[in-house]
Image (cartoon, grey):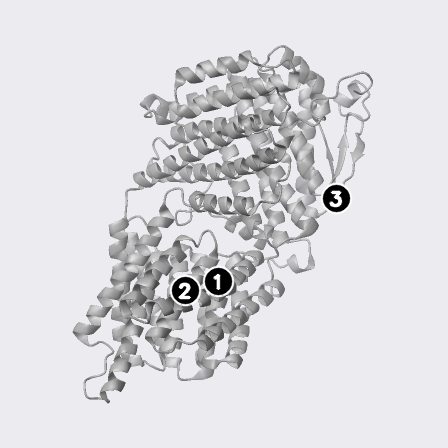
Amino acid sequence: MRDGRAEPAGLARTADDELTQPPRAPTPRASFRDAADRLVGADPGLTQLRTALQVVLGIGVALVLVYLFVRLTGALQLPAGSSAEPVLSATNHELLVVSLLCGGLAAMMAGLSVYDRTLRCQVRSMLLVALPMVAAMALGLLVGPYRVPSLAFLVGVMALAVYVRRFGPGGFGAGMGAFIGAFLGFLLHTDLGLGDTGWIAAELGLGVLAAQVMRFAFSRPPERTLARMRRSQVARARRLLALSVGVLGEEDERGIRRLEERMRRQLVRLNETTLMIDAELAEVRPRTAVVEAQRLFDAELAVSNSARFASALATSGAPPAVRRAAAAALSALLDGDPPSVSRAVAALRTAMPARCRASVLVSRLAASVELCAQARDQVTRPVRDDEVAAAAGGDFTPAVKLVNGWLPGSTPVSAEASTSRGRGLLDRATMPPYVRATIQVAVAGTLAVVAGDALSGPRLYWAVLATFLAFVAATNSAEQVRRALFRVGGTAIGIVVGALLVHLTGGSYLPSVATVVVAMFFGIYLIRINYTFMAIAITVTVAQLYVQLEEFSWQLLLLRLAETAIGVAAVVVTVLLIVPLRPQRVLTTGMLLWICALRRLLEAVFVRLDGRREPLRPLVRDVDAAYAALVATATPLRGATFGRNHSQLTEVLCVSSAVRQYARSLAAQAEEAEADGEILPRADIGPLWAASEQLRRSVDEIGHHLATGERGRYVRSSALVAFVLDDLRLRSSPLSNVVSDLTMLDGALARLAAALRMELADYDTDRRGDDAVGLRDEPSVKASPP
């Protein structure tokens, strides 16, 4: 109570504020469950599973084709009688292994670098991989006998392979092919000569052919991929609803916290899957994409709101009977029986408590369950021509464009950070990302070559390989360091696993091939979960290769580990000192991009409240895409920050998730209130106009803080509409939900500002009648976080 009046709704700690509470440290069981969840969630269309199967079977087919090719043509084999029989047999076996290595590598590269859907584009991409590989290998064999030129050539190809990524997927594939070719030329120049290039080219071609055959075998219509993504989305939504039922039945506070954290993860996965579906719809069904995307948006929003209100109700102190009725309504929704849903919702409304705040939660949960049931039915219905005609206002543009079938991750954020001037001394340099990466890989490659050659000249290629691969699928210093460390860790684990498997296979040919195929399958399939698995698979493969070459020893594997560590050290030193794209700079850019998207959405909502219709769904999807990029950017940092920085990052991500949910709900409620025809223009409700203007200025203040580093001050606006909200609820006005979500959004943004160590201020600490509503008095400072 303040001055005999009730605490304003937006300032007291509400049940919805539980969304902004940072999660507790996960238990080992929770970590395992999270890893399994990421494994499934990272592959909603089973694209990665099909890719792994396609690539390893392509490798298998390539090995068979190359083996038959060598036996039929005698490629790279010494003629009979040219040496003593034992020497001849050993040399020919070694050259056969080399041929198999070339064919297998070509198949793997072609399988991993080509994602085109049409045959013409696939053939072009395959050639962009194969031709640079052959040319670079020929040059590698040519300069291989000359030590300094060969090392300079290797570093030069590394830099060139990174630079040509500016040309998109085609440049990436050509660069990877050129590096692998140069790597093979440097590796094999003592065994092969320039005259053997024709045979090697034929074997590389067989590898590419095998990859193309498997691509045809595993090709599927885009409609089937889209259908699989939708099934994954439905499964995600059902799991989120099941967790919502569980949280309503949980009595222990720690148990509620654990379930809420799992719900947060499901919300992120559900949103990522929906963004991918939107992008697929634009490609597969351009005519009906607008209608279907709107249906999916409505369904996802209803499910996420149901989960949000269930979580809030579980922590609001509502009576057990109310929570049981809420759980029953969600269970009926899970069962998919419309009459049962209607009865359960009616029972939930009957059980509505007298307490104002809990009654609001119950009312909104009941409405969300009804909307979810309606949206689910709409999603499964065919799109009618009149719906397409009604939605015809332009082509459908998804919020994100998939990169090789996946969300772009942190790439847009890193690109923006690389081309924007930062605040720190090390962040002043601006340049395109590919230029920055080219400079860094050239410096790191030089360091790796010099140090690796000092340790072991014949084996320095492992240092070079570790250096180059640290710059693949990594766009900033944090990701590059993380990938490099995963590689050295995976190599260490792979040495142990590889030695054990060598002992089990006994060096036999067929068991070795089977071991390589299985290891590569798991490495490729799990690479999106953690790069360590790929490093383990490569090390296991190398161990089997050494056995076939009769070079296997613990000392050799340990030398490989040492060379890999040299490459990793070169990467770490370089990306931290040479034109670094620092993690804090990238994370700040990601936050700023997300805040800008949020600002555009709020502006459109407020304009809509003034009677001007601006589509909100595309802007909501822009907020979702910016948030997904922010999460992808921050994920590598969560395990690399400690103490206060780790706590701040965790809280920022957690609160940002709540802000996104409130903003989505605000947009939906604004559209719903407008559709009901009872909404007044914002200017006719002075407190609402004042609160929205203050919220807009406060969001701008957060953006200014992120852009300049100035501390700034966030002024809360919820007190301006506290009494208006109470009145709207008493009149059951559709506008009450808009004001409620506006209040919750303001509270979450204030938590975000506090997490960013901004100053906080409130209007309720120094109210002077209408002056406060009219924003003529400066609000007094309420709290200043340390």
Q: Which residue is mark 1?
A: 490
- Depicted 773 relative to depicted 714: above or below: above
Instruction: List x then y, in percent, for residue 157.
Output: 44, 70
Q: Which residue is mark 2?
A: 538
- Depicted 241 relative to depicted 440: above or below: above
Quarter assignment of residue 652: top right
Of 772 and 467, which appears nearest the observer?
A: 467
Could you tell me the amino acid type at mark 3?
A: Arg
Of 661 and 116, which appears nearest the observer?
A: 661
- Depicted 122 relative to depicted 156: above or below: above
Of 731 and 140, which appears nearest the observer?
A: 731
Does label 1 or label 2 sit earlier along the sequence? 1
Looking at the image, residue 643 sits to the left or right of residue 733; the answer is: right
Asked if residue 622 shows in the view, the reply is no
Does label 3 or label 1 sit earlier along the sequence? 1
Could you tell me the amino acid type at mark 1?
A: Gly
Could you tell me the amino acid type at mark 2?
A: Ile
Q: Which residue is mark 3?
A: 711
Of 227 and 746, which appears nearest the observer?
A: 227
Looking at the image, residue 717 sits to the left or right of residue 766; the answer is: left
